[in-house]
């Protein structure tokens, strides 16, 4: 099965979705879609209708909070929204940026999330550390097939306060990182640096078959060309399968 995650660059405000975005996503043939930095508005109605027409009949999203963005998940099989405890001390941006769903017909759960782009101040660094500690806690306790995916605002090569190390910690406790062998998911407007900050991690129950960052495909420009791009992030498309021998 194919999983797709994409930061669609709504920031924290309502933003019109390009008419061809649903078709562009569908052209990559994912089974599940996790959109981050999504802000729901009346303008999203057409987009959701187009997703439905392309076979993504099931969709859930986090509750809209003024001044914050949301997570949106769509699937071609039923989704069940599951409650998950989010510690308040992480920050006010966290609840609308975390969405936990079950896919009963596929036999696994998905935690879709976006770690906010915290500044380098001491207070913000502590918040990011707490967010990662919470992810690691979930990872250490999980016994059911689970995928954690979205925008982590963390590159594996980040040092110190920017927290590349928790990715290594997650892998150390048995999680698999679906890391593309090349490419990037975000290019800095300020200095042009290419960063891999959108990720998919799977529990031990899966085999990862493929992973790639997609800037453009089938004449659709996801990112990389300012005049035509739909977002400032690339799509991350990952193919996985459940390993039935793993308990």
Image (cartoon, helix red, strand yellow):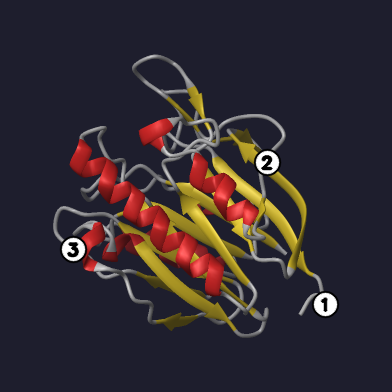
Tell me the crowding category of disc 1: few under 14, some 14 to 19, or many 20 or more residues within 10 angstroms, Cα based: few
How far apart are the alpha carbons under marks 2 and 3?
32 Å
What label does residue 212 carry, if any? 2
Left/right placement of residue 176 relative to residue 80 reads: right
Q: Is residue 133 above or below residue 180?
A: below
Which quadrant: the N terminus? bottom right
The residue sitting at 27% across, 50% down in the picture is 127
Position of residue 185 measured from the top left corner of the image (x, y, whole percent) = 53, 35
N-terminal of the two: label 1 or label 2? 2
How far apart are the alpha carbons under marks 1 and 2?
24 Å
Q: Secondary structure at mark 1?
A: loop
Position of residue 10 measured from the top left corner of the image (x, y, whole percent) = 30, 45
The residue sitting at 42% across, 37% down in the picture is 231
Q: Which residue is mark 3?
A: 65
Residue 85 appears anywhere in the view: yes
What label does residue 94 carry, if any? none
Which quadrant: the C terminus? bottom right
What label does residue 244 carry, if any? 1
Left/right placement of residue 99 relative to residue 165 reads: left
In depth, the one of 57 and 30 nearer the eye is: 30
CB contact under 8 Å: marks 1 and 2 = no
In this view, which residue lies farthest toward the top?
Answer: 191
Left/right placement of residue 204 relative to residue 155 reads: right
How far apart are the alpha carbons under marks 1 and 3?
40 Å
Position of residue 70 measured from the top left corner of the image (x, y, whole percent) = 31, 59
N-terminal of the two: label 2 or label 3? 3
Q: Is residue 182 above or below residue 20?
A: above
Residue 24 appears anywhere in the view: no
The residue sitting at 22% across, 67% down in the picture is 88
Position of residue 125 measured from the top left corner of the image (x, y, whole percent) = 28, 41
């Amino acid at each position: 099965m194919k999983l797709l995650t994409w930061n669609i660059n709504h920031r924290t405000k309502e933003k019109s979705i390009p008419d061809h975005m649903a078709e562009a996503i569908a052209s990559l043939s994912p089974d599940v879609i996790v959109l981050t930095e999504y802000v729901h508005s009346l303008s999203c109605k057409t987009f959701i209708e187009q997703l439905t027409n392309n076979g993504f009949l099931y969709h859930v999203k986090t509750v809209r909070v003024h001044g914050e963005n949301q997570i949106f998940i769509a699937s071609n099989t039923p989704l069940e929204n599951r409650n998950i405890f989010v510690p308040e001390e992480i920050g006010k941006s966290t609840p609308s940026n975390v969405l936990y769903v079950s896919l009963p017909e596929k036999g696994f759960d998905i935690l879709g999330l976006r770690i906010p782009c915290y500044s380098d101040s001491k207070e913000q660094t502590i918040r990011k550390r707490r967010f990662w500690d919470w992810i690691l806690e979930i990872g250490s306790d999980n016994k059911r097939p689970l995928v954690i995916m979205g925008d982590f605002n963390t590159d594996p090569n980040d040092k110190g306060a920017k927290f590349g190390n928790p990715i290594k910690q997650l892998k150390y406790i048995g999680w698999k990182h679906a890391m593309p062998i090349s490419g990037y998911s975000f290019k800095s407007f300020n200095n042009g640096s290419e960063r891999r900050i959108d990720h998919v991690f799977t529990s031990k129950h899966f085999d990862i078959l493929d992973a790639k960052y997609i800037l453009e495909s089938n004449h659709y420009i996801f990112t990389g060309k300012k005049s035509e791009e739909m977002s400032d992030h690339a799509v991350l498309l990952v193919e996985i399968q459940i390993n039935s021998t793993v308990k």
